[in-house]
C-alpha cells in the first residue's frame, strides 16, 4: 500500500497503459490481454448492456406508468427509441434509465 501511495503520478501511465506500475509489477502473472490493455469498459457501457437486455421491461414500466399517465413523457418518441433493436448509438439510453428511476420512485411513494 505504501509503495502504491508513493508512486509519482507521472508513472501511473506509461506507454499509453493505465496502471503501468501495477501491470509491470505483475507482468509475469497477468494475461497478455490484461497486461497490454489500453482501455477498459466504462460504466456507461455496462448500463447500455443492462438497457439492451431489459428493453421490453423498460417499455412496460414507462408506457404503463405515472409519468405517461400525467403526460410527462413523449410516448411516441419513447416508443420509437425503445423499438429499435440495434444497440444505442448515443447515450440516450441513460436518460431513459433515469426516467425508469423516477417512475420506480413514484411507484414506491404510492
Image: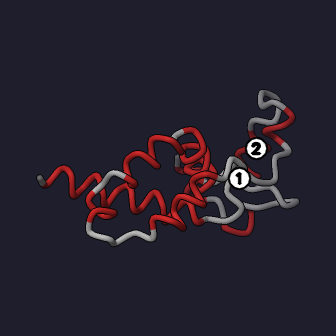
| Side of 95 where 61 appears, left or right | left
| Side of 3 where 19 appears, left or right | right
Q: Is residue 4 visible?
A: no
Q: Is residue 32 above or below residue 101?
A: above
**In the picture, residue 9 is in which quadrant?**
bottom right
Q: Position of residue 87 (x, y in %)?
A: 70, 51
Q: Position of residue 66 (x, y in %)?
A: 26, 59
For label 2, the residue is 23
Dot 1 surroundings within 10 Å: few (below 14), some, or many (20 or more)? some
Q: Which element is circle 2 on?
A: helix
Q: Is residue 2 visible?
A: yes
Give me the residue at 34% from left, 72% from top: 72
Q: Position of residue 80 (x, y in %)?
A: 59, 60
Give me the residue at 74% from left, 56% from top: 18
Instruction: Pick out the residue farthest to the top.
Output: 29
| Side of 65 where 97 appears, left or right | right
Q: Which element is circle 1 on?
A: loop
Q: Is residue 52 above or below residue 67?
A: above
For label 1, the residue is 19
Contact, mark 1 vs mark 2 (Cβ under 8 Å):
yes
Give me the residue at 55% from left, 50% from top: 47
**In the picture, residue 70 is in which quadrant?**
bottom left
**In the picture, residue 12 is in which quadrant?**
bottom right
Q: Is residue 77 above or below residue 38?
A: below
CA gap, disc 1 to disc 2? 6 Å
Near-viewer residue (98 or 67): 67
Q: Position of residue 96 (x, y in %)?
A: 48, 61
Amino acid at each position: 500500500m505504501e509503495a502504491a501511495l508513493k508512486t509519482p503520478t507521472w508513472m501511473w501511465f506509461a506507454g499509453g497503459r493505465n496502471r503501468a506500475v501495477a501491470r509491470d509489477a505483475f507482468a509475469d502473472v497477468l494475461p497478455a490481454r490484461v497486461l497490454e490493455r489500453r482501455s477498459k469498459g466504462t460504466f456507461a457501457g455496462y448500463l447500455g448492456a443492462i438497457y439492451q437486455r431489459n428493453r421490453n421491461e423498460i417499455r412496460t414500466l414507462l408506457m404503463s406508468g405515472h409519468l405517461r399517465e400525467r403526460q410527462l413523457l413523449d410516448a411516441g418518441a419513447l416508443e420509437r427509441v425503445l423499438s429499435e433493436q440495434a444497440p444505442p448509438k448515443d447515450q440516450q439510453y441513460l436518460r431513459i434509465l433515469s426516467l425508469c428511476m423516477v417512475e420506480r420512485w413514484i411507484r414506491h411513494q404510492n
